Structures are given as C-alpha cells and as structure tokens.
Image (cartoon, helix red, strand yellow):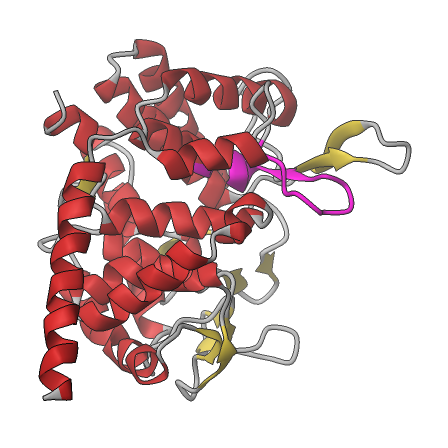
Amino acid sequence: MKSLVNMFFTVMALFAFNANAQVEQCEPWQSWQVFKNHFISQDGRVIDLGSDQSITTSEGQSYALFFALIANDKAAFDSVLNWTQEHLSEGDLSTRLPAWKWGLDKNRVGGILDSNPASDSDLWIAYSLSQAAILWDERRYSILAAVLAQRIIREETAYITGLGLSLLPAPAGFEFDNERYKLNPSYSPLFIYQQFKKLYPHSPWHQLHEGSAKLILDTAQQGVSPDWVMFDSNRGFYYDRKNTDLGSYNAIRVYLWASMMAKDAPYKQELLTQFAPFMDTIEERGHVPLNTYAQSGKSEKRGPLGFNAALLPLLAEQGNDELVMAIQQKLMIDKSFTQTRYYDSVLHLFGESAVNKRFKITADGTLLPTWSTECR
C-alpha cells in the first residue's frame, strides 16, 4: 500500500513538473536574470566570483552569449559580445581569436592574463553568432561567425594520423613531438560541427565531426569520459602520471552536450548506449559523482549541485523520472550556488533550459529557442 501511495505522489509530482515546464517555456527566464545580476557586469563581463584575480574567461563569455540567445535577450548578447571583442580580441574578433583569460594583475589593473585562445569557447562564440544571425536577422553576426569558424579550422585543428581531423584545445601547447597530442573530449559539441557543416560546406567540418565523435566514443569505453587524454599516432589513446583518466569538471560537459543533440542526430544513439553504465551508477547512488575514471568506469564522491543539474536532460531522456524529480527538488530547496559559484551556475542554466525545453537543437545542429517557435 505504501509503495502505491509513493507511486501516486511521484506521478502527480511529475505531472506538476511537466505542466510547470510547459508554462515556463514562454515566461521570462528567471534563472538567466539571476545569473546576469550576480555574474555579469554592466559592460558585459562574466566574472568568476571569488577567484583571486576576479577572472573572466572566453568560456564564460561564450556561454553567456548562448544563454542570452535562448532568453531572447539581445541587449545582453550585444553587451557580452562587445566586451569580448574589445578586451579579449584587441578590438576585433575577426582578426584575433579571443584570449582565454582576463583578470586583475598584482596592481589590480585589468588585462589579459593568458593570451592563448580556448577552442571550445571559440566554437561556442561562433555557433551563438551564427544562430543569432538567423534568429535576429543580423548580417554582421553572420559575417563574424563565418570568419571565426574559418580561423578555428585554420588555427585550432590538426590532422592526426589514426584519428583524423581533430580539435586542438588551443593553437599552442597541445601538440608535441613524435605525433603526440593532448585532447579534451568536452571541447567538441557534435551538434556545432553539424551546423557548421551545413553553413560552411566548403570547409572540412564533416571531417572534424567524425574525428571528434571517435575521440568521445573511444575514450569512454567503460561508460565515462575523461577530462583529458593523450593520443599517440603509434599507440592510440593513453594516460600518464600527469594526464590521468580522471573525469570531473571537464568531462561533465560531454554528457550535457550529448543530451542536447536531437534523437536522430548522428552518433546520438551510440552515445546514449555508451553512457548507459554511468546513468545506472547515478540512479543507484541518487546523485552525480564528482570523479569518474575512464579506464575502470569507477566513480567516487558526491558532485556539486551543478553536476546534478547538468545531467538532468540525459536522465530525463532515459526515463529516470523519479531521480529527475528528486534532483529538481534539491535544486529548488538550495539555489544559493546560483549566486556565488560561476561554473555550477553555468551547468545549472544549461541543464534547466534543456530539461524545461526552452530550446531544441535539430539533427543538423540548428538552434530553435522556444521563443522563436511557440511563444509568438
């Protein structure tokens, strides 16, 4: 009898959750407003609160552009874009890929702290610009996106024997002698490559898509992805003391990007199958682990709330309704992290907007925010 009562309340809670999600799709996105209020300056700088140098990364700027687009917040989009161009690209995104890190030096003067670009951020900036050009009918976004996409191919990729065309994490520092490379699976949302393959058919985005899919699948043979992995053209993927098989703050995004892909997108079903053991682990524990190990598939410790939010879409897609509801309830009870912890807040925005269907991404990578299709 007790189990029947619990099942009844679970079903009712799920019904209420789905109903609220449907209503919320066309309402102003409150979580985005909270993020803006706490992490974005008036002039468009995304700040990692609590960091010693009050740092800003190109990653933060790129994600903010995507969220602003999802929220139909063109003013914020332009503000973040302008700050990125002015401070990370020396005034012109078309001639310089954005520096990875900006912050305050020992004299508390702001400036670039690390000029090496981050390729994943560059991808997200180019993607957000390309989709904003379509959704807001802005030609200048389209031109800038095309130039950035071209620079990414030219400056941040390499053809790797045994792997194919691959995304390097940055233009410098990740390619070594004897055909050795350091790679990051979370840097490659496959749907971005699909969209660029459509938009820029004369560039090798399909090759990059295929090489990146191989990277993601081959490094997650035990169901979990590593943060970083080494590749040797003679021996394949490997780990060493400096670059272990640990998966944590980077790897969490691999599952998030997979969940954002359309059901009929290339490699979607293979990814769902590959990550099924990890989903089983999460269901058994009732939370997302902090650390996983790609070679053994083992996991340990409890991840922060942002990790749980990031896995909501994938858990929901695989029918883990009770766990989805349990995580949602925890996030409703404790949202203090959305005002203090930048990265957890980012993961929360991605997970919440995806599970609440504020947008969808088609098989060819086209972004369709709900405001553009159902809220007019």
**Position of the N terminus by quadrant:** bottom left
In magenta segment, residue 213: no
Q: Eyeballing the image, is 58 above or below 83? A: below
Residue 344 in view in this figure:
yes
Between residue 45 and residue 275, name the one nearer to us: 45
- Image spot of residue 155 (x, y percent): 50, 38
Say which quarter of the image contains residue 221: bottom left
61 is within the stretch colored magenta: yes
Magenta extent: 46-63
* Residue 336, x across and y down, in percent: 53, 51
Residue occupying the point 24% across, 12% down: 137
Q: Residue furthest right?
A: 107
Decide if residue 9 is on the left or right side of residue 260.
left
Residue 176 lies left or right of residue 282; in this view the side is right
Depth check, front residue: 372 or 247: 372
> What residue appears at the point 55 percent right and 44 percent down from the top-left corner?
339
- Residue appearing at x 10%, y 72% in the figure: 8
Picture layout, residue 3 above or below residue 212: below
Q: Position of residue 300 (x, y in %)?
A: 50, 83
